[in-house]
Amino acid sequence: MNDDTKKQKSTEGRKEAPTSLKGMHDIMGDQYYAYQGLFEKAQEVAVYYGFKPIETPVLEKEDVFTSAHGEGTDIIDKEMYTFRGKGSDRLAVRPEYTAAVMRAYLEHGMANLPQPVLLYSYGPVFRHENPQKGRLRQFRQFNLEILGTEKSIADALIIRTLTTILEEFGFKDLIVDINSMGDKETRPAFIKELTNYYKKHLEHLCKDCHERIKTNPLRLLDCKVETCQPFKENAPSSLSFLSNDARHHFKEVLQYLEEMGIQYRINNSLVRGLDYYSRTVFEIIKIDIDENGKEKDITITGGGRYDYLAKMMGSKKDVPSVGTGLGMERIMMFPECKQLPPRIMKPPKVYFIQLGFEAKLKSLCVMEVLRKARIPVHQSVTKDSLGAQLGLAEKMEIPYCIIFGQKEAMDNTVIVRNMSTHSQDTVKIDALSDYIKHLK
């Protein structure tokens, strides 16, 4: 039997170690804390602006999203994870938050609360996209929603809260690209004109746009294929079709942005591809320099108003609303995004060294004393060498060590060592927390 045959036989029946699914990944260590730090900062800003938390289930009935998104959208056509449950219901793994939040608003009678209702949410969402940098099949999103008002100040508040969060993350010189898609009285006329315009150029459009013109003409303006770009410049503008109410609403939103000093640009080709969007739509832009030294726009995130979503989901009345979502993976790919330590991550003041079995028996009780006093501690319960642990504390630049050996365990004391001066004191365990708190 040759070596290759032996190798083949030795691997037959061997089970390969499992790996994570394509487009999904484990988060651990410093990366976990990076996500947590960003969420805590976004949450802090949202709370200051009056938003309250909501957490919706990861699983919903499929029609929560299909009724909301309409035909011709990538979420419905390509990206949702759907399956039949053990009963007869078709289920979907949450592809976005807005429809789920609206379902919760309707189900729990939030219309009876003082309006508007301001909600924030955070968690994983799932889309069967082609994985790439900043875009995964499971990703984390922070959402802001204002439900129950058509007032323009709600649009401005969403934009203000979102730009504040991004500025706290480290972004500067942001620009808001903004447009109005009109209301249900005027939008059909715009879509008709837009469709007629693009039909004249049908032979030059990409394959996807051939489908969009039939199912979702607004997404013609959202196409990123290079050959379709020249037609955007002369395409009809939705602003030309606005009703008096929609025009007044849009003007007020711009006035709020000007009053707050938020830089904006009116972008006639900006649309949102989902059926539930109306009136205000926006994207947050940063200007970058490409390899040729030219300026280019990079979209960070976007959002808009969705006044007709509730009726699409079966409500008898419209619930005028506006919202936005922030994909954390995309945010973290930008170099200006800060590493924000979460609240739990206080730098340890003390390294706790335990020597011998008798000391280890009592060590967890000593650690509990420090925890109750809110003194962060680093330790290695498995190491026994004093030199190795002192070396590790020095490498981590921890200013003090607590040394707890067999003698100290018997005397209910510890030795506190200053790592800079190498001086040390013997301290009773009962007095340890007060002693540590007074150390500089």
Image (cartoon, rainbow, N blue to C red):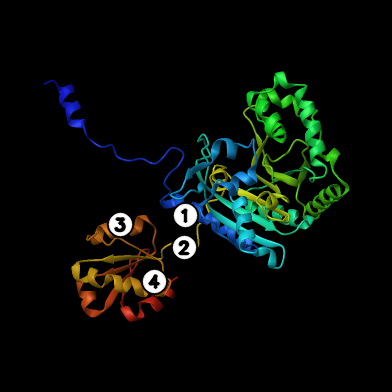
Can you tell which quarter of the image residue 5 is in? Answer: top left
**Where does the image place residue 416, in percent across and percent down from the top left?**
33, 71
**Mark number displayed over residue 78:** none
**Mark number displayed over residue 371:** 4
Q: CA distance from mark 2 to mark 1?
A: 9 Å
Outermost residue, top side: 203
Q: Are marks 2 and 1 in contact (CB under 8 Å)?
A: yes
Marked residue nearer the N-terminal end (4 or 1): 1
The residue labelled by disc 1 is: 33
Relative vertical location of residue 346 with respect to residue 277 in this rendering, above or below: below
The quadrant the N terminus occupies is: top left
For the residue labelled by badge 4, is the local secondary structure a helix, a strand or a loop? helix
Outermost residue, front side: 88
The residue labelled by disc 2 is: 344
Which one is in front in this view, the residue at disc 4 or the one at disc 3? 4
Q: CA distance from mark 4 to mark 2?
A: 12 Å
**Of 22 and 103, the residue lying toward us:** 103
Left or right, 396 with respect to 312, comes to left
Marked residue nearer the N-terminal end (2 or 1): 1
